Image (tube, rainbow, N blue to C red):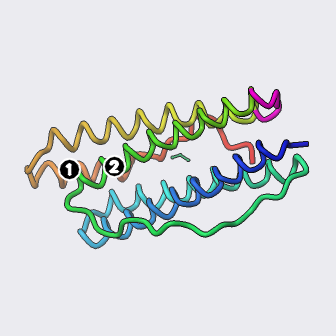
Amino acid sequence: MLSERMQSALNKQIRIEAESSQIYLAMASWAELQGLEGTSKFMYAASDEERMHMLKFFKYINERGGHALVSELDAPALEFGSIKDMFETLFKHEVYVSQTINDLVHISLEEKDYATHNFLQWYVAEQIEEEAQARTILDKIKLIGDDKGGLYLFDNDIKQVTVVSSVSPQA
Ligand code: FEO
């Protein structure tokens, strides 16, 4: 059985993962309108991946006798000044998500909830991969600078990049 504090913290994370999915969906749409087909495809897949992260929390809470909640979400940014701005926003967001996962791990230890601690390890590994991927993409974008040909090649390359999933989904 989950403690009230653990359950409420996990439900908060459901909201964060759902918001991540919306943030990346908005990025997919913006990139599509810029004609960045590869980037857009990557962001649609990233949005799906975040929904999967959300659902894993969802199922876990109910499995442990809690009640997984669907909550109101904050509206994401719809416009970006440039593709660099967009990936900077994405990178900062992933760093923020990693922090929220760390906070959950901390709570699970305080609550002596070792099952939840074990469950969270999947997310700890996933965040290392997601941050690393976002950093690599951002470094490439910075290298390209204002070179339109470079951007074209980047967009073509990112089409082949699969959204990272460090461990196969358990849910
Ligand atoms: Fe669910 Fe990208 O962290």
Q: State whether label 2 is within 8 Å of ligand 1.
A: no
Quick check: is 113 in the magenta stretch?
yes
Look at label 2 and name its amino acid: Ile
Q: Nearer the viewer, residue 38 or 20?
A: 20
Residue located 20% across and 50% down the image: 153
Cα separation, mark 1 vs mark 2, equals 9 Å
Look at label 1 and name its amino acid: Leu
Q: Position of residue 91 (x, y in %)?
A: 37, 43
Query: Residue 2, relative to residue 159: is it above or below?
Result: above
Q: Nearer the viewer, residue 131 or 103?
A: 103
User: Which of the 4 image quadrants contains residue 5?
Assistant: top right
Report crowding for label 1: few under 14, some 14 to 19, many 20 or more residues within 10 A (C-alpha): few
User: Which of the 4 image quadrants contains residue 148?
Assistant: bottom left
Give the residue pinned by disc 2.
Answer: 158
The range drawn in magenta is: 110-116
Query: Residue 1, relative to residue 65: is it above or below?
Result: above
Q: Which disc number belongs to residue 153?
A: 1
Q: Nearer the viewer, residue 12 or 138?
A: 12
Residue located 36% across and 53% down the image: 159
The kind of secondary structure element at disc 2 is helix
Quick check: is 135 in the magenta stretch?
no
Q: Position of residue 53 (x, y in %)?
A: 63, 50
Q: Position of residue 26 (x, y in %)?
A: 41, 67
